[in-house]
Image: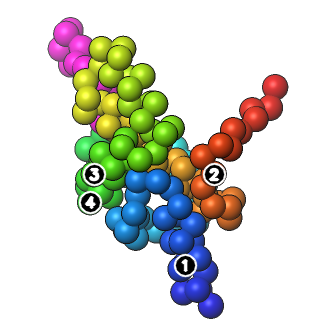
Amino acid sequence: MALQLNQDLLTRLKTILGTGQNINYVSGFDRFTSAAELCSYAGLTPTTRESGSPARGRGRISKVGNRKLRNLLILCSFNACKHNKACRELYERIVNKGKSKKLALIAVANKLLKHCFTIAKSGRPYDESYVSVLPK
């Protein structure tokens, strides 16, 4: 029974354009209570160096986390930028602001992971036209 539910989850996750077969590595969504925790686990959250020298360092992604998952998501973000409209728009918006392409790919990987988390928790497949309504 658990294998069937897991297989159902994988089919829902594969509905996200740009992930494909690579998303099989992402599992264990029930261990996390929020998408921010999952992104931190993957090492996709930004960190800043504030103590030490007076010259503060640039913000970087956290290297603490699951390296294989982070690398997999960054590779998926290449594909998602080609096929997923929301990811392509995010990538282009960040690059047009003058930011680096690598930073834009990391932002897309973060977005993909948040999509995966939402699909795993909600039980619905990915819908490109879905717009969440934030409570006021």
The CA span between labels 4 and 2 is 27 Å
- Dot 4 or dot 2: first in sequence order is 4
Residue 16 colored in magenta in the image:
no
Q: Residues within 10 Å of mark 1 (few under 14, many from 20)?
A: some
- Report the amino acid beneath label 4: Lys
The residues bearing labels 2 and 1 have C-alpha atoms spaced at a distance of 20 Å
* Quarter of the rendering occupied by the N terminus: bottom right
Q: Earlier in the sequence, mark 1 or mark 3?
A: 1
The residue that mark 2 highlights is 127
Q: Choose top left, top right, bottom left or bottom right for residue 95.
A: top left
On residue 50, which mark appears?
Answer: none
Amino acid type of the residue tagged 1 in the rendering: Asn
Q: Determine the residue located farthest toward the bottom in the rendered image.
A: 1
* Picture quarter with the C terminus: top right
Sequence order check: which comes first, mark 4 or mark 3?
A: 4
Report the amino acid beneath label 3: Leu
Which residue is label 1 attached to? Answer: 6
Find residue 36 and report its horizontal and vertical position in percent.
52, 44
Q: Which residue is labeled 3 in the image?
A: 75
Report the residue marked by disc 4.
68
Residue at far right of view: 136
